[in-house]
Amino acid sequence: MLASEEALTSQSYYAASVRRPPAAPSLAGAERADVCVVGGGYAGLSAAIELARRGHSVIVLEGERVGWGASGRNGGQALVGHASDDAIEQQLGAADAKRAWNVTVEGLDLIRARIAEFGIDCDFVPGYLSLAVGERKARALRQWFETAQRDYAYPHWRWIDHADVGNWIASSRFHAGLHDSHSGHLHPLKYCLGLAQAARACGVRIFEHSRVTAIERGAAARVKTVAGEVRCDFVLLAGNVYLGDLVPKLESRIMPVGTYIVGTAPLPEAQAASLIRDRAAVCDTNFVLDYFRLSRDNRMLYGGRVSYSTVTPPNLAQSMKARMRRVFPQIDPDIAIEYQWGGFVDITMNRAPDFGRVEPNIYYLQGFSGHGVVLAGMAGKLVADAIAGQASRFDLYARLSHHPFPGGRLLRTPALVLGMLYYRLRDLL
């Protein structure tokens, strides 16, 4: 667990609005499996489902509880694309960047398919608004939209002119925007727990409170915890920032970034219905962005504060309410903030995903950079394909080059804080 995180993990609206099954047992003694998955989030569980369906025996080791990390606490926005499609195109070229884009489109289809097949009740709502604050950012969004439409031929976008913004959101803050009817939002913890239940139904064995302490490499790898070990042919590392220094080379290429969300008391039903057309998810286009949506029970779930120093921002509830009311001043200033929570996501230097192999039989998935709801599920599927001998799409991502954050463990955080101050200043212009 990272610094300052423990105090917020139990204050999540998501955790308060689910009924968890009893804890799975911890690993004790020696077990054998074809594949050992480290991490019980979207990526690990998705891979486990796909591998089990291909006939592999699979064990998942989770250091805390299933969905404890980013997969159970994120903003719930299921979005097409990557955090930086530009970085992918610069490295891979236009044709392969489109192949990567199409992976995320398939990822949205995969979410819908799994919800339907496994009966996962996770409050999925289609629709996503990307909104620009100010004329300059509107021009940039329009330019990006026209280029992306040309390159990706994605049929679900609709441009929103300045005169039409009020028909989509009851706020004067935004100048123009883009509506995506295929993306959407969901209850992330309900979805993650649903994936775990689906994995178990497919024959996957899940062990909780089983933090991995070491991996012995070899043709038959050994994945060790304090109380046991798993001998396996393949290992998938899907713990992201929570792997710690298990594989130092991987740790240096991602940065833990704190993200924070608050949940209000339920809004009056008529007011909730009036705020966002069709209850779509919303992000602004600032580099340090705000994102928000309505829950099934009419709460405003508002995210926007980030921490690049691993320290939780002070006065979180008050500052987030102020940000929310800057967008929606019609919300009662005395409305209670009933939930506030946060945690860490992993970002890479170029904000492109980092997938690859530590050894021929040890795979890893990390660097989702805030786009993990869709991409992590597909990443698990790509790993399963690769283990089955169909590695072309996994290797497409593995071709992306990544560099460690400068400064090492001690200095990389202060350097990133200074860099983000620059981008915050740009957002104000």
Image: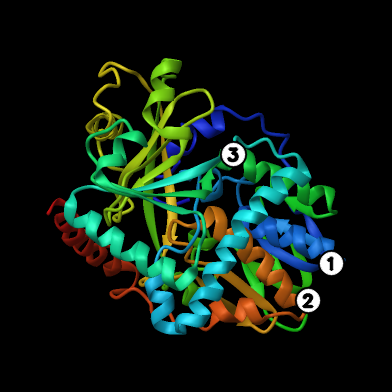
Discs 1/3, front: 3
Q: How many marks?
A: 3
398 left or right, relative to 370: right
Q: Residue 186: image x %, image y %?
A: 56, 40
Q: Which of marks 2 and 3 is in front?
A: 3
Q: Picture coordinates of residue 329 (x, y %)? A: 24, 25
Q: Mark 1 points at which residue?
A: 54
Instruction: Say whether residue 21 is visible.
Output: yes
For label 3, the residue is: 124
> Could you tell me which secondary element the residue under label 1 belongs to?
loop
Q: Residue at x 42, y 23 (%)?
A: 272
Task: Give the image quarter of residue 147.
Answer: bottom left
Q: What amino acid is found at the position of numbered circle 2 in the picture?
A: Ala
Counting residues from the N terminus, which is met first, the one under dot 1 or under dot 2? 1
Neighbour class for label 3 at 10 Å: few (<14), some, many (≥20)?
many
Q: Are marks 2 and 3 in contact (CB under 8 Å)?
A: no
Is the Cβ of the residue at disc 1 closer than 8 Å to that at disc 2? Answer: yes
- Is the residue 163 above or below the residue 386 in the image? above
Tell which circle, 2 or 3, labels the residue nearer the N-terminal end: 3
Q: Which amino acid does label 1 sit on?
A: Arg
Write down the residue under mark 2: 388
Percent position (x, y) of residue 373? 54, 52
Residue 222, can we see it? no
**Residue 43, percent from left and from top:** 62, 59
Decide which of tag 1 and tag 3 comes sooner along the chain: 1
Q: Which element carries disc 3, helix, strand or loop?
A: loop
Amino acid type at circle 3 is Phe
Q: Which of 235 and 348 is in front in this view?
A: 348
Cα gap from disc 1 to disc 3, whole angstroms = 28 Å
Residue shown at 44%/24% (left/top)? 273
Horizontal relation, residue 334 to residue 247: left or right: left
Where 208 sits versus 139, above or below?
above
